[in-house]
Image: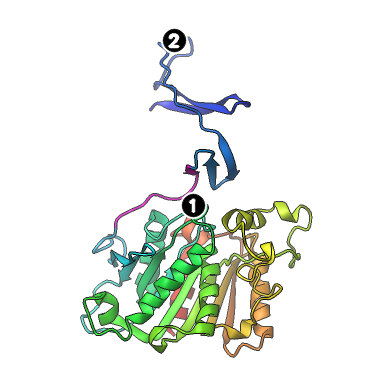
Amino acid sequence: GVSSKDITILENPPISARLYLPKDTPPDQKLPIFSMCSIAKEVARELLPFLRVYKDGSVERLKGSPIVPSSLEDPETGVSSKDITILENPPISARLYLPKDTPPDQKLPILVHFHGGGFLIESCFSLTENKYMNSLVSHAKVAAISIEYRLAPEYPLPIAYEDCWAGLQWVASLSTNDDKERESWIKVHGDFERFFIGGDSAGANIAHNMAMRAGAEGLHGGVKILGTYLTHPYFWGSKIVGEEKSEEHEKLLPFLVWGFVYPSAPGGIDNPMLNPVGPGAPSLAGLGCSRLLVSVAEKDELRDRGIWYCDAVKESGWNGEVELIEVKGEDHAFHILNYGTDNANNLIQCLASFLSK
């Protein structure tokens, strides 16, 4: 019942504090004053609402859900999950998911998933990600692997891309390794003829870049990506697309995030990793998958980029199937942030249908 509020004491130097008051304190009651001081750290830079970086090198993340453990049986869906270490150097881990009551000899589609969070926040082990993946795996009946990659600014891009590529190649390598103890869930239940990748927001950006790299370099064991889904994909560029705001284009969050997470990016905001049709970008005809599902949200700042991307893929001469879904009345990552709503459930059903074809 204690009340609290935050105040700014001084602007320069920047000093703030949190005040506390006991429950049901009468308006005229006097109380003893207790002050507990901490050393104010000086902010070097910040990207609100995500994080602050202090001059001592420490990073304070202001958003993101808490880390939760895996479970042999999720109470809501019955999905089983477990955490594994994929590689020691670089340090890459993952959370694996298996649908409820999977028979010992049943083969399932394989999904390699990349979480969102602007390359800055969130984790494959976070509460929101865990709830979403449990629901998706339950509906789609897939064996899923959600890759944990290192985050900026401590580990600026392209480190996350390299982590995810190493994780994706590790999963593909299980197709030819006879040691069933080297991840039995995937070895026993995974059908490498039905191999999918996908992600949300920054994770969708990663999925696109993984599909492009797979098309150019191939995966271990000759594994082919059957389908890729991009949910609210994070793409951007210097040129205005659709109905994007033309005024103060460089002050919009998608622009600012890229400079924060990849300050040394060749080509800056038009780097091919972010602008897939920018200068020097490889042809989208090289996408290394057979099917592509892109979903956008009507109120999302990234909506027009997702539609533009679909059109660019179609115009590239890519020899695959492209599907676009738009959900009306919703904003960015609603299916994760507003878990359990009708629109969130409907989108998960669409993804499940894509993964079951």
Q: What's the residue at 74%, 67% (across, down)? A: 241
Could you say where residue 272 lies in the image, as x and y percent from the top left?
A: 64, 71
Count of marks, rendered view: 2
Q: Going by the image, does 179 lie left or right of 37? A: left
Q: Residue at x 45, y 55 (%)?
A: 122
Q: In the image, what residue type sits under mark 1?
A: Glu
Q: Relative to 241, is 108 on the left or the right?
A: left
Model colouring:
rainbow
Instruction: Estimate the x, y position of residue 311 in percent, counting from the top left.
Output: 68, 79
Q: How busy is the neighbourhood of tag 2: few (under 14 within 10 Å), some, or many (20 plus)? A: few
Left or right: where 38 falls relative to 45: left
Query: What's the amino acid at mark 2?
Result: Gln
Mark closest to the chain's N terminus, 2 or 1? 2
> Does the magenta stretch mainly form a helix, a strand or a loop?
loop
Question: x, y percentage for residue 332?
Answer: 57, 59
Q: Secondary structure at mark 1?
A: loop
Q: On the rendered image, what quadrant is the N terminus found in?
A: top left
Q: Which residue is mark 1?
A: 154
Magenta residues span: 58-69
In three-dimensional space, the C-alpha distance between marks 2 and 1, rounded to whole angstroms, equals 48 Å
Task: Say which element carries label 2.
Answer: loop
The front one of 193 and 283 is 283
Outermost right residue: 247
Q: Position of residue 133 (x, y in %)?
A: 39, 65
Q: Residue at x 26, y 84 (%)?
A: 106
Q: Residues within 10 Å of mark 1 (few under 14, many from 20)?
A: few
Outermost residue, bottom side: 319
Q: Say whether residue 342 is visible.
A: no
Is residue 298 positioned above or below 120 on the image? below
Residue at 68% x, 73% y is 308
Q: Which residue is mark 2?
A: 29
